Image: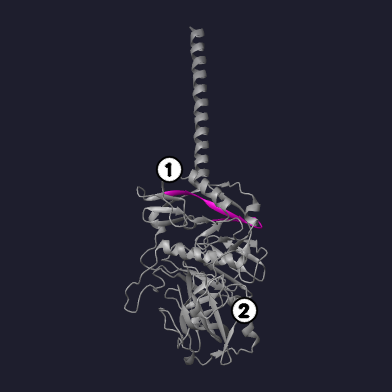
Amino acid sequence: MATTLRNLLSKFSSVLLIILLVSNCCFHVEKSFAVAAELESQHFHTLEISSLLPASDCTTFTTNTKGSSKKQSTLHVFHKHGPCSQLDQDKSGSTTTIPSLKEVLSYDQSRVNSIQTRLSPNTNTNKINDKKANLPAQSGRSLGSGNYLVKVGLGTPPKYVSLIFDTGSDLTWTQCQPCARSCYQQQDPIFNPSTSTSYSNISCSSNLCSQLTSATGNTPGCSTSTCVYGIQYGDQSFSVGYFSRDKLTISATDVIPNFLFGCGQNNQGLFGNTAGLIGLGRDTLSIVSQTAQKYGKYFSYCLPSTSSSTGFLALGQNGGSRNVKFTPFASSQGTSFYFIDILTISIGGRQLSISQSVFKTAGTIIDSGTVITRLPPAAYSTLSSAFKQLMTKYTSAPAYSILDTCYDLSNYTSVTIPTISVTFGGNAKVDLDPAGILVLVDSSTACLAFAGNSDASDVGIFGNTQQKTLQVVYDVAGGKLGFGAGGCK
């Protein structure tokens, strides 16, 4: 009897041990799966599709001024076609025609073609010859369509105008009365130099007049001893007028005297209802160079995730930038553009197999006016293929303009997309916001927000869609570019 009891207890202990071992094993397996799932979720974004659409009302972003230096001046940045700009309303308050996404992408390609022609002057392209502008036939400067604006004051007393801000341009200009030849329709009152007590023209004999050649790509003209500038863009838009100086007001306490700009008397093209353009390039006539003594050739901006929100443009350094990763500027071509080096691209947490030589062949610039990032053909095809592999859950949709990796989301209210990050020179790894990965064509169709160049010799462009919500820092004097996450929403 005792022997039988011992045998039963022994068998019970063995069974209990097996149960414990199995339970412990299952616990660890479940824990491993949970950890794996958590790690996997870190490499994907799940978002409401509606979050990629702009709201009907404007949400104003408030910059954090805590610890800010007096050397910094900050302006609100707003999208040209969003509710924050009100530029799509006529004098009666009625909404004017807003360009479709297809039109925006078409204009964007014109800008890209213009940039690539400027950087590769031997490219065989059709030159632009607009007799109305009285300018020589050239490839033209670049003008984008997905532009962001700031509002500044000109003259004494200051008159406020909404200007496109553009890191790919140098000369700042605005339309001016009396519009001797032609002025397009703009929302703000056209600047009238005769009402400003601080306005003056630059003479043809001034050394400043000769600086227009590098800033505009055209030799300046002369009209009754006044220096005349002329600038034209890749889409045949142009501005011609007097080279002038006046007071530039950024805020009530930040005023730039004797600011050099173009006072446009003959202006035509795709400028929307804006009053002109403010140039943030590296040329001596850009606002960056003209304000170097005050702001130290240092500026930053943040572009909001949708056109219904505002971001900021800050001139000068406030010392409050957090978690900014810097990459050195690469060797540049010309005096305007900001070149950077792309080392790698990762998607879904995995680095793509792209040789660095692919990115180095033509180089890459960062540009505030180009909407969609352009990659070398080999880099784009690799990124597109990897994106498709991670998006098999969704039905493919036909290509839309320059966007060819598209999906039908009509049966979904949310979408899960892989993370994308870009590593620049100096190992500065930058994670893109979801708004920089996916662009909505309409409420039920979305596309990967990248495009490929047609040739490996075409310069790559890191566009403004991929820059959304990042604080982008230009330390021009220090020779480096920075990216900080969560600069605005």
Write down the region rendered in magenta.
415-431
* Rendering coords of residue 130 (x, y %): 50, 76
Q: CA distance from mark 1 to mark 2?
A: 54 Å
Residue at coordinates 63% horizontally, 84% vertically from top-left? 208
Coloring basis for residues: one colour
Closer mark to the observer between disc 1 and disc 2: 2
**53 lies above or below 417:** below
Above or below for 184 versus 302: below
Residue at (64% x, 88% y) in the render: 206
> Is residue 93 inside the magenta stretch?
no
Secondary structure, magenta segment, majority class: strand
Among the two numbered marks 1 and 2 on one chain, the one whose residue lies closer to the N terminus: 2
Q: Position of residue 256 (x, y in %)?
A: 57, 83
The numbered disc on residue 213 is 2
Which residue does the image show at 48% across and 86% down from the upper left?
A: 158
Quadrant of residue 226 in the image?
Answer: bottom right
Find disc 1 in the rendering and name its residue.
393
Relative vertical location of residue 68 with respect to residue 179 in this rendering, above or below: above
338, 327: nearer the viewer: 338
Question: What amino acid is at disc 1?
Answer: Lys
Helix, strand, or loop for circle 1?
Answer: loop
Q: Position of residue 293 (x, y in %)?
A: 64, 79
Q: Viewer-proximal residue, 145 or 11?
A: 145
